[in-house]
Image (tube, coloured by chain):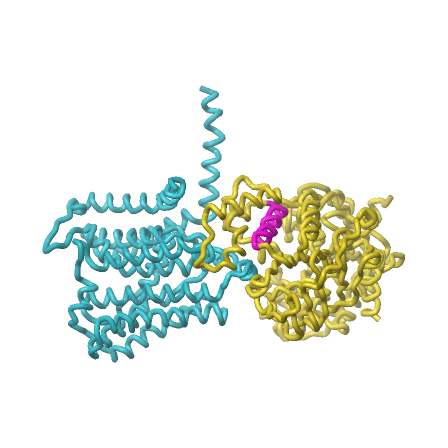
Chain colours: A cyan, B yellow
Amino acid sequence: MTAILRSYALRLLPQLIALAAILLMVSFVFPGFFRLEIQNGRLYGSLIDIFNRGAPVVLLAIGMTVVIATKGIDLSVGAVMAICGAVAASSITSGHSLAMTLLITLGTGILCGLWNGFLVAVLDIQPIIATLVLMVAGRGIAQLVTEGAILTFNDPGLIFLGSGSFAWLPLPVLIWLAFGILVALIVRKTALGMLIEAIGVNRQASTLSGVLTPVLLIAAYMLSGLCAAIAGIIAAADIKGADANNAGLWLELDAILAVVIGGTSLLGGRFSIAASVLGAIIIQSINTGILLSGFPPEFNLIIKAAIIVFILVLQSPPARNALTFVALLRASRKPTERQAR
Amino acid sequence: MQTVGDNLLSATRIDKVFPGAKALDKVDFHLRRGEVHALLGENGAGKSTLVKCLTGAYRRDGGMILLDGVEVDPRDTFNAQKLGIGTVYQEVNLLPNLTVAENLFLGRQPRRFGFVDVRAMNHQARALLENYELDLDVTRALDSYSVAIHQVVAIARAVDLSGKVLILDEPTASLDAHEVEMLFRIVRRLKARGLGIVFITHFLEQVYEISDRITVLRNGQLVGTRDTATLERRDLISMMIGRELAAEIHSARKEPDVTGPVRYRFKDYGRKGHISPFDLDVRAGEVVGIAGLLGSGRTETAEILFGAHRADSGTAELGGKAVQLSSPRRAIVHRFGFCPEDRKTAGIVGDLSVRENIVLALQARRGWTRPISRTEQNRLADHYIRALDIRTVDREKPIRLLSGGNQQKAILARWLATEPEFLILDEPTRGIDVGAHAEIVRLIEGLREKGMSLMVISSEIEELVAYSTRIVVLRDRQHVASLEGERITADQIIEAIASANERGAA
């Protein structure tokens, strides 16, 4: 048991170090960074803000991790967020109950995932193209639902999901925590995780071994759609309205980036949901950090790009070869040095 | 022995080692001036590895190459071209959207004032192609011409660039009879000009039509070089698939008792374009060997039985009851197992551990909701690592880091863990070292003795003779003969393949 725990810790170590480094850097330029206080029965502070603001990307990253593990990608999640936000807003304003609204919205997200999964698993279209279809069409669909306007609502129940709090924590944080733990448990306590990894590494060999490849692929995209739906509800509830044009805009890229920072290879296979969640938090820390530091927000994009480049360089085969080479060199040098001394 | 003067290209004792397998083992290859030399062998025999060593695409690990009596060491294909060794691959390396002339002179276009002199280039191209009896509009895009013309253009380019040795790797695979004739006229003309031509193909009739000498490789080793005129087709086939040891092994074999009831009955089973409908009965405790040359429908037979491709005719019965084998999953439910021919792309799941690879099929059959506990996974993995002697540091090592033979054993373990009743093995001993080879053969015999039904496909006749209780011979995607009991000898098998072949050629 301790061995398994230790292997988890080892897996998450790079992400934890990166997160700590970024938080530390931000705290230098913004001294009050780690301060937490309780007002109106809810924790306030920059850290809480990061966890709260990061909720949509964390949720998208959870679904994206599973899709990427199957050697796929889901470009449509940002657009699905917009669709689901629009569906939630129009459902609640047309008088449906909160429970009914949530049911319809989550169902819409799952349906979007089913569409993507069908294109990928049954029609065998490359994931990047298959999900591009919904990425492009999705905003149009969302605008049709909102009839081109920003659809506002004032249902306290729905708004509570975006800005309420429970047990001192903002509700979005509780939602992604609970959902992340649930998905991670389902994936790792059943055989799903291993079967998904097998598909991602070698789809043909997995099919020949009897793995239900098409069903699992579709399920992965449906999970991603469900994640996007939850993220869409939170984003809409946060601004008390559905903005078909801007809700979730470019967030698919942040989600992919979070997965990559989390160390899951875009070539599929081994994945870690916890690491992707950390990746998403790292991204949000950078965003918040730059805002707090008083840099103009334009810097945000450039610094983010620099960090992506840095991480990709670290993961590239030449860099890895160089690192192994250095490590081998040290390993071979050490004993001789000691002897010399 | 031959003097240097005879040989245009002389490769001696060429070695090439890949992780886990010796691809070439001290292979000699001599090419004379003005001859067409056929290079033959089954898949994985080392033909393309040898060619790649000669053209510099691979670095050889040992041996010497003499060209015109001078030692050469081609660093890459470009360097080999400059030395005089040109290659035309099956998938022609041309740019179909450029003109014929541009394809011929790409990278070395005649220039005038620093610009490409299109007129001079077209003129030269026309002159060049006249040697090949071709009257093409060289200013038209290459893709407005047929594949055969592509081949000729590629040959013209290679000969113009290199001019000493021309290697043709399966040039006729996608040509019709008429086009093959045209290609052969050109090859004869080049031969008359004194070029040495290496011809790789699977079509034996073409070998007899065009080649002067034949070199056969098997398992990375040289079997021999013969004059085509004096080599019987039957002897050639036995050189390709081996028989020398077969007689010995067969005499030592004890006759197994396979009078048990028929367990699987396939009637009129087939799929258009893959394998013609066939009848097949498989009994408990029986090893059905599948023999035939490459492309005869061996793998297709295995795939259709396992449901990797759906049968479009016929019925399958299991213990007298009709069953649908429409997918691998269905077949696995009926206790089938299948080790595919291409271990890398269809067998191993490279990044996953040995343990995960071993439990994969069992886990898939149980479904994702009933995970095999980690303790049980460890027990299964350790059991098979010990039982099959899989050489690995530990069960958590990614399987791609294992050698070919150990990967094969792990895939076998994956199926044994599902306790199959019918195990289909497609080339289980290809590309693995001798030790692992013998272990897998012993394993097959052991499983049969325990009452399992097996089907084994192999290019190695001696191997089939050693463990099969019945041999089905395939030719042209048809089951053409079935040999049992006393008739299972290398001679009989070769006879069946060869006579079928002669009939096919006639």
On the question of residue A221 being in view, the answer is yes
| Pick the front one: B84 or A202 | A202
Quarter of the N terminus of chain A within the rendering: top left
Q: Residue B91 at what x, y percent from top left?
A: 64, 63
Q: Which range of residues does the magenta coloring cover? A: B403-418
Q: Residue at horizontal 43%, vertical 67%?
A: A218
Left or right: residue B222 compared with residue A280: right
Magenta stretch containing residue A112, yes or no?
Answer: no
Residue B411's spot in the image, x, y percent?
59, 52
The image quarter containing residue B326 is: bottom right
Q: Which residue is drawn at 25% across and 55% down?
A: A287
Q: How many labels does the image show?
A: 0
Q: Does the magenta stretch include residue B412?
A: yes
Q: Where is residue B390 in the image (x, y as percent from the top left)?
A: 60, 43
Q: Which SS does the magenta portion mostly show? A: helix
- Residue at point 31%, 62% (across, down): A251
Pick the front one: B103 or A155: A155
Q: Which residue reaches farthest top? A: A341
Q: In this view, does B83 lie to the left or right of A206?
A: right
The quadrant of the picture occupied by the C terminus of chain A is top left
Q: In this view, does B181 lie to the left or right of A56?
A: right
Q: In the displayed structure, would residue B385 be above or below residue B169? A: above
Seen as rendered, the residue at the extreme right is B230
Q: In this view, does A2 lie to the left or right of A215?
A: left
Residue B476 lies in quadrant: bottom right
Of all residues, the one furthest to the left in this rendering is A40
Q: Please indicate, yes or no, whether residue B83 appears anywhere in the rendered image.
A: no
Residue A215 lies, in percent from the top left, at 46, 66
